[in-house]
Image (cartoon, rainbow, N blue to C red):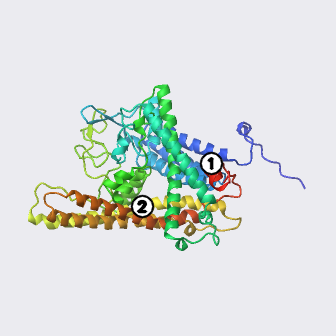
Amino acid sequence: MSSTPSPPLPWFFAFLPTPHPQTNNDGVIALLVALHLCIAALITPCTPGWKLFRAGIIVPVAMYLYWYCAWSALKPNHEEHWGVAAGCCWSIVRALELLVLYPAEENVYRVTPQADGDFVREPIPPPWTKAKLYWAYSLWWSNRGIGWNYSCTLPPSSTRHPFSRTSSRKAFLLNRGRHYILWIAFVDLVRAYMALGPGAAFFDGRPGVAPSYDSLSMVEKAVYSLCVCVRIMWSIEKTFTGGSLLLVAMGGVLGWEGEMWSPWGYPPLFGSIQELWLHPGLATVWSRTWHQLYRRWLYVFGWLTIGEKLLGLPHSGQSARPPPPHVTPSGAITPTGENADSSSSKVNSAGRASPTHLLPTDPLSSSKISKSSVGTRSSNRSTAMLSNFIKSLIVFALCGWMHDQASYALLHRIASPGDKVNWVDALGTIPFFVAQPFAIAVETFIKRQWRKVKSRQYPGGTPDWLVFWERLVGFAATWWWLGWSARWFVVGLTRAGVWRMGEDELPSWTLFGGLIWGKWEV
């Protein structure tokens, strides 16, 4: 018998890298290639032909590379695998937003403050230029939209020194450097406690071995929930703060300015406890205190695309594209000049509540209201509240899905050969997120009724002693709800094995593990 000859290989195969066993570097390369494909696509003209090129070629390739990076089992540990999968999900929806559904050149732009308090819309650089390249990098990096028209709502502490536009780089680097070192020390303590402390079996999350959440004491539930919260915060903080230290220092050395290179572009991710005390409530937690890194895509895909465009719910909140001329901006800074493309369009930050306050809590303003309009106003308010509630539910559900798809990817990594992983096994955190709009709705109703009672009892203003008790009750209720509902989040992540030591995972050095438990590696 004669064997069939193998077909000759194409000539360019000789220039390809030699095949090798898969390593973690392959995932890193895939991530970098996907990122720069998206950046390169943003440099092109925003014309119909190039839009088709972006949507038909660039985005599918980038999505595949992000998917490969998220699902590749070659990560240093389970926690990083889960975090990378969540980050790649964000990158995919970011690419869909800026390159397909809401082209960046038509929907986002930088704003520059003026001495009189107004803002000027910066022109978008021409395609195929170095300026457009810098613009694209900055846009992709600006998750929270600092310096852009989609900037998130920031607490007061995030706009003060050393995070203001007049702050020096030295002050910022010293402040954030101390912050970073304290975080490293605290997380090392928490990490050692989770691996070596009395709750080690619970955090390992192995079925049949880990104790159930309901069997824990109240103190154990509080401590374990705090540990999970710290680890989640650090997974975001280490990249954000570490990157800000590097980029702000580079900006000083190279003489570069802008939100990517200056202190004002990196306000703290999390608000202070003091600000939550002054304005207690779940609306404050989710719109100001907690990080707003995913706010943009959740609004664009959940609130706007699914809620308003697909379900046909009434429009409310910030629009994904600039409003028509002379329309008052809503939350974010939007142009008000006659020509939306004018580089000198004056804009301001006035307008109605930001969509990050997913349920409006302030009464509608009106100069004169006739008795005949009271019923209509009440009906409109009820309709708006229901519409906003549905859109809020969609937004929080999407946020839960993003977390649980990362758990799904991780479960595939740790599953034994032949084991089947179902989506149901990964749906651990979504109940936590879906429950939040219901709690916010109850909170909004209680606050509104209380304001009515208070306005009748104290028409001249709220006395100081009552303000204190309002804050105390609101602060306690906020933390009680977060602590109680955290069970779904904590159980969902531990059951997925986020902090379980993998068989292929190497232990890392720990200071507090050695000092307290006598074990220097966990």
Residue at 36 percent of width and 44 percent of height:
157
Instruction: Point out the image quarter for the C terminus.
Output: bottom right
Kind of residue at badge 2: Phe
Q: Is residue 194 left or right of residue 3?
A: left
Tag 1's secondary structure? helix
Q: Is residue 84 visible?
A: no
Determine which quarter of the picture holds residue 448. bottom left
Residue at 30 percent of width and 66 percent of height:
386
Q: Which residue is mark 2?
A: 396
Q: Nearer the viewer, residue 31 or 273?
A: 273
Q: Residues within 10 Å of mark 2 (few under 14, many from 20)?
A: many
Q: Position of residue 131 (x, y in %)?
A: 44, 30
Q: Which residue is mark 1?
A: 511
The residue mark sitting in front, 1 or 2, is: 1
Instruction: Point out the image quarter for the N terminus.
Output: bottom right
Q: Is residue 89 left or right of residue 74?
A: left
